[in-house]
Image (spheres, grey):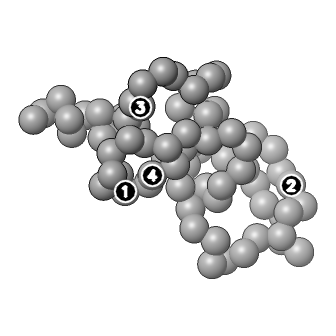
């Protein structure tokens, strides 16, 4: 069993004793595995696709479409 540090950006939130599957996909700005409450970017071509609430500073699911900061930046340039 490998100790897994759950991080937000460069900040570690907590260490867990959850086994790490090296084949498990990573998501979000933090490149972490899926855990906790997450939100999906509404850009069908988003590179990361899913984001942890703490990493987005969200506390609830917003109404309507939601775009991550990378996709939101791209849509504003069009």
Front tag of 2 and 1: 1
Do the residues under discs 4 and 1 have CB atoms within 8 angstroms?
Answer: yes
> Along the line of sight, which residue is nearer the eye, 33 or 14?
33
Q: Which residue is mark 1?
A: 47
Q: Residue furthest bottom?
A: 23
Q: Residue at x 37, y 56 (%)?
A: 47
CA gap, disc 3 and disc 4: 11 Å
Q: Which residue is mark 2?
A: 16
Q: How many marks?
A: 4
Q: Residues within 10 Å of mark 1 (few under 14, many from 20)?
A: few
The x and y percentages for residue 44 are 33, 52
* Above-or-below relation of 54 to 23: above
Q: Is residue 12 visible?
A: no
Q: Which residue is mark 3?
A: 66
CA gap, disc 4 and disc 1: 6 Å
Q: Earlier in the sequence, mark 2 or mark 1?
A: 2
- Report whether 54 appears left or right of 66: right
Front tag of 1 and 3: 3
Q: Is residue 74 visible?
A: yes
Question: Which part of the image, by quadrant, shows the C terminus?
Answer: top left
Q: Residues within 10 Å of mark 4 (few under 14, many from 20)?
A: some
> Along the line of sight, which residue is nearer the eye, 40 or 77?
40
């Amino acid at each position: 069993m490998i100790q897994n540090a759950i991080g937000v950006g460069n900040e570690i939130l907590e260490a867990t004793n959850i086994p790490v599957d090296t084949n498990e996909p990573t998501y979000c700005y933090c490149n972490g595995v899926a855990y906790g409450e997450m939100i999906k970017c509404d850009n069908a071509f988003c590179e990361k696709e899913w984001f942890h609430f703490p990493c987005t500073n969200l506390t609830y699911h917003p109404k309507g479409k939601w775009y991550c900061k990378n996709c939101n930046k791209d849509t504003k340039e069009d």
